[in-house]
Image (cartoon, rainbow, N blue to C red):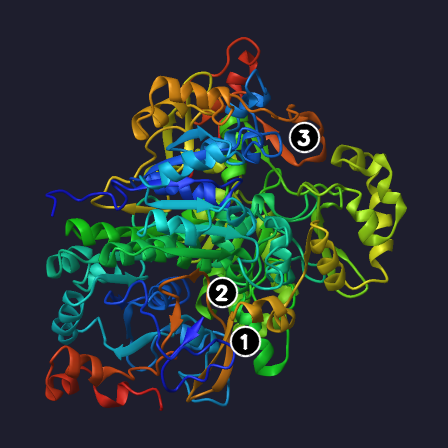
Amino acid sequence: MRTMPTGLRPTCGKMETEPAGGALDGVRVLDLSHGIAGPFAARLLGDFGADVIKIEKPGTGDFARFLAPLKSDAPAPEQSLLFQYLNWNKRSVALDLRTPEARPTLKKLVEASDIVIESFRPGTLNGWGLGVDRMLEWNPRVVFTSVTNFGQTGPYANYRASDLVLQAMSGIMQISGRVDREPLKHGLAQSYYCAGLNAAYASLVAYTAAAVDGFGEHVDLSIHECLASELVLNQSYYAFLGAVQGRRAVVQDPFAGEPIPARKGFLAVQTGGGAPFDGYADLFEREEFRDPKFASAPQREQRVPEVRALLEECLADKDAKDLFLKGAQRRLLVGVVQGAEDLLECEHLRARDFFIDLEHPATGSFRFPGELVKLSATPMSVRRRSPLLDEHRFEVLVDELGLTLAEVESLTPVRARSGGL
Amino acid sequence: MSRKPTLPLAGIRVLDLSYVFAIPYLGGLLSDLGAEVIKIESPHRLDQTRGRAFGPYLDNDPGEDPWNRSGIFHVLNRGKQSLVLDMGQPQGRDVFRRLLQKSDIVLDNYTPRVMPKWGLHYEELKKLKPSLIMLSNTGYGSTGPWSAFPSQGTTLEATMGISYYTGYRGDKPWKVGQSYPDFLACWAGLSALFAALAHMRKTGRGQWIDVGMYQIGAALVAEPILQKQLDGSDRERIGNEHPEHVPSNLYRARGDDQWMAISVESDEQWAILARLMNQPQLADDERFSHASGRRRYRDEIDALVAQWARERDVLDMLGLLQSRGIACGPVFNARDLLVNEHLRHRGFYERVEHKPPIGPRPIIGRPYRLRFRDARIQKPAPRFGEDNRPILRDLLGLNPEQIESLFEAKVVCDQPTNPGQSGSMNTEAMLRLRTLAAMDSDYRSRIGMGADNTGKDQAADSAEIMPPIPG
């Protein structure tokens, strides 16, 4: 991933002297959202080259400014490293959308935007007189993307949710975990990242259409439905067969991808990749795996304890990463369970220029996951670190939108504006 | 400028060489958005989703042509045409090149060596079509020391960092969900593809998109990656709990395998929940009144909520707690979702009319609604080779003799040469192991997709019907 101008210290990403433009150069995005999903989507558009202006609540800003990990010796609301991750390539303006004084400014911002992303609870913006209809009245070509738990309509529209609740209600948890235990969720906050990926693409779906036909759009995205979209197998079990899928069996073939403990780490092994099963005999240097009685899943399922004991014995004196590398070179389907430290040290991610170092005045430099996907002509890029709260008020409102200094000063009392830096 | 809103991919033609989940799904979604998508299939190697590896076959019966009866194939490949083309033969690649000149986007998920081996890598293809956008999806991307490694969703989920942070408290890492990395690649690929399309429409220039699934997953575990650098600590596996909010967990409810997720995210909500549980004294208990105290007494709090939830119905709790602003919801299964009132209201599943024997089925649509544009599943997934002749005749303008010679040379085929084994799932064994929770012989009428098979299933018609979900 490219990192570019001054203020950034690219030690991992390659520095380009003549940076290529981004795919979305010239596209203007207004980010009214908060948390993870909406801001991640807006950031991805920024990574593709869009100019993103983030509107935040005066005083405290996006609540993600208070999400862990927090660098506690930095001044609030500039402590959150997660906020930094979700908001680079953006400029910040604090604007209290609840006040009538903010309206003319917001109108100018919307008029100058191609895409607006918001994540308020359904009806909130409308209650402030800033709903989608008003936005489309101000700018009939604008794409207005709403990112909410259950969408804008339907019986659940006003329901509250959490990452856990979304994973439960989407059906993912019903098939996760072991049948004799409770259903199990994906770790961390995966729902919101899934929604962010979808909101980015859905916004571009509407933007590319609007660029041709001149009509704006309301994209009404449901995080719940993003997760339910993963159940392509599970739903066809029912819709084609009447079968309700459950969780993983108590006793199952260890060659079905579950992490198996090694001396160091955990290895995941899976058959079916095209390499013959006796490749495992070579990998583990154990002739037993040439025995035809282990060759297929139905055969192994007949003698699971034996297979499992043998596999665990093979792994007991080996490191998972080492087996992963050797197995993959033999074209076996293997994975190694990796955590933060492993990923930070991964030779492959390093070779792909995946991580980027970003210097931030409040927290110092940290290393962040960077480029999602490589585009050959218009690479994704990080052109600026995440903004301090309201850092770009004058640059955006005065220099670019043409407000007078007096108008800007009257928008928000100075004392409520600053985050301490 | 047209007078009506249009779909973004109207007039765009896509050649889809991909297999299994991630990119076939991406291609299916492109057709929902107006593209004409031609799925190019190998006569020698069936897409695994047409076969036994994934299935399930319609009513668990492989029939005469199992490759046309797989449920998941119909979800992923809706809206496409099928051309069965042997790319291993020079003539097959020649057909491909001619198609390419009439197309805008190419999708593939071969390992990085395959397309170059055929002389069909992006640098070659763009000579034929400078505006071409090509998306190649691989486990690890086209460069780097692991680029040639074989991969697949399950093993990638471990390698990309997700499994490390997933699992029951105190237990080993877990793989959960179903091919999670495939969906991440699908969605990330879509955003890159639309960004590239916007660029192409402005400049006339195409480009190559190199998707490596591994690094997409690694980008979604940023919290522990940053935490590690901040203080050297690592996030532990905590099952369904939340590191800060208590109670936030899954609780067993009344009935067979019924579970309720409840997330209390403020002291105020805790006080509300305590009253709803008829234990107002808990709201005043100083040990529990603040988040830090509830974290300290996590086990006691969880036990109290578990005891309350145990004899209650999930839908009763859903209505009660949501009416008071507490985030909660049941663990829904496949059946619950397909009859779910909210998803029905949202039109999430689309009714797609397939030719017999499949008939009407609900197919997963898209997780967003557009107000002005009619994105929808355009047609059912194709039968194997269904569009061979129309594509050769109408798109390439070949005459009948040329078309027949392609069939004679087995460059284009109507049947798979090596369909592999097919068989039905052992549903009885799966029910015994509980990897299947239930089999509903009356599933068609339950999901409103026509009458159930008569005869063998008459008794099932009186089976219990799921109660509607309250608003």
Residue at 64% over, 62% down: B164
> Which type of secondary structure does the marked residue at label 3 adopt?
helix
* Amino acid at the residue labelled 3: Leu
* Amino acid at the residue labelled 1: Leu
Indicate the chain on which mark 2 is placed: B
Residue at 64% over, 24% down: B422
| Front residue of B88 and B107 | B88
Horizontal arrangement in the rendering, residue A248 relative to residue A62 (left or right): right
Which residue does the numbered mark 2 point to in the structure image?
B270
Q: Earlier in the sequence, mark 1 or mark 2?
A: 1
Q: Earlier in the sequence, mark 3 or mark 1?
A: 1
| Disc 3 crowd, CA 10 A, few/some/many (<14, 14-19, 20+) | some
Residue at 53% over, 42% down: B313
Q: CA distance from mark 3 to mark 1?
A: 43 Å
| Disc 2 crowd, CA 10 A, few/some/many (<14, 14-19, 20+) | many
Q: Earlier in the sequence, mark 3 or mark 2?
A: 2
Which residue does the numbered mark 1 point to in the structure image?
B226
